[in-house]
Image (tube, coloured by chain):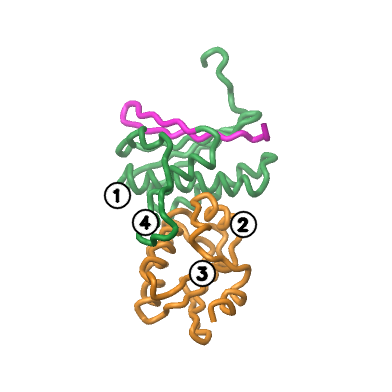
Chain colours: A orange, B green
Amino acid sequence: MIDSEARGGVTLARLTDKRLDAAAAPGFKTGISALIEGGADRIVLDLTAVSFVDSSGLGAIVSALKQLGSRGDLVLAGLQPPVRKLLQLTRLDRVFKTYDTAEDAVAALG
Amino acid sequence: MARGQAVPDRRVDLTLEAAFPNVAMATRAVAGVCALTDMKPEHIDEVELGLAEAINNVVEHAYDGREGGEVRVSVLLFPQVLRIDIEDEGRAMDPRLLVDPQLCFDCGDPDSLPEGGMGLALIRQLFDAIAYETRDGRNRMTLTRWLVVI
């Protein structure tokens, strides 16, 4: 489940569930894809509430990044240690910009 | 029991229907078992992630997402080692896939970024040893990790 709000030109998309795993990934993908189709092009994905992401969940985030392509930006905020670890292990920490808080990320993209 | 074979101190077996919503129940249960040991919380997180990847692979590949398949997860605590056996009766994995799985992509090329296929490479990094065998139509992946820093 994604809660989203517009902050100036930035879309703050907040995940409300604790897990972004293989069970949750299809629903997330549908939601984030709808946001992008609906015009969101600078997106802060707030993962503060998320304590677990697996490679399927991460793959769904990658798919959103690809959907945006060069016309936008998607950054991550509020990563809990297990989520940060997954990014490191997959080396996707070199691809995604991360911020400690959603507010920091919104300020950086705004 | 063969002479010299180590006997676990404690063991628990979990059986789940092969479906993604069930995976979290098994991985959280195993995390609870790990919390009985001296493992650090961040190491328990790693076991949880690696196990989730292994069970996800069974659901997605061994059973091709079909309902009704069964997965058995056995957790064995030895004095110095945690061992997790994951068994299924679905399609066997090509064991060659376990040999040096790679995560290859080019940071500058978004099209090359992986949306899947990361599971085995993660499992490799999160456990100290992996074995896989198929016998009498039953597949078993064995994941082992030291409980102590060596």
Q: Main secondary structure of the magenta part?
A: strand
Same subunit, tags 1 and 2 = no
Read off the residue under disc 1.
B66
Q: Secondary structure at mark 2?
A: helix
Residue under the point 51% across and 61% down: A19
Whether residues under marks 1 and 3 lie with C-beta atoms below 8 angstroms apart, the answer is no
Read off the residue under disc 3.
A75
Residue B47 percent location from the top left of the image: 56, 44
Residue type of the residue flagged with mark 2:
Pro
Q: Residue pushed farthest right?
A: B38
**Residues rendered magenta in the picture:** B130-150
Residue under the point 65% across and 45% down: B35
Q: Which of the two discs, 1 and 2, sits closer to the camera? A: 2
Visible residue check, residue B80:
yes
Visible residue check, residue A27:
no
Chain assignment, label 2 = A
Same subunit, tags 1 and 3 = no
Residue type of the residue flagged with mark 1:
Arg
- Labelled disc at residue A81: 2
Read off the residue under disc 4.
B112
**Mark 3 to mark 2 CA distance (whole Å):** 17 Å
Q: Quadrant of residue B100?
A: top left
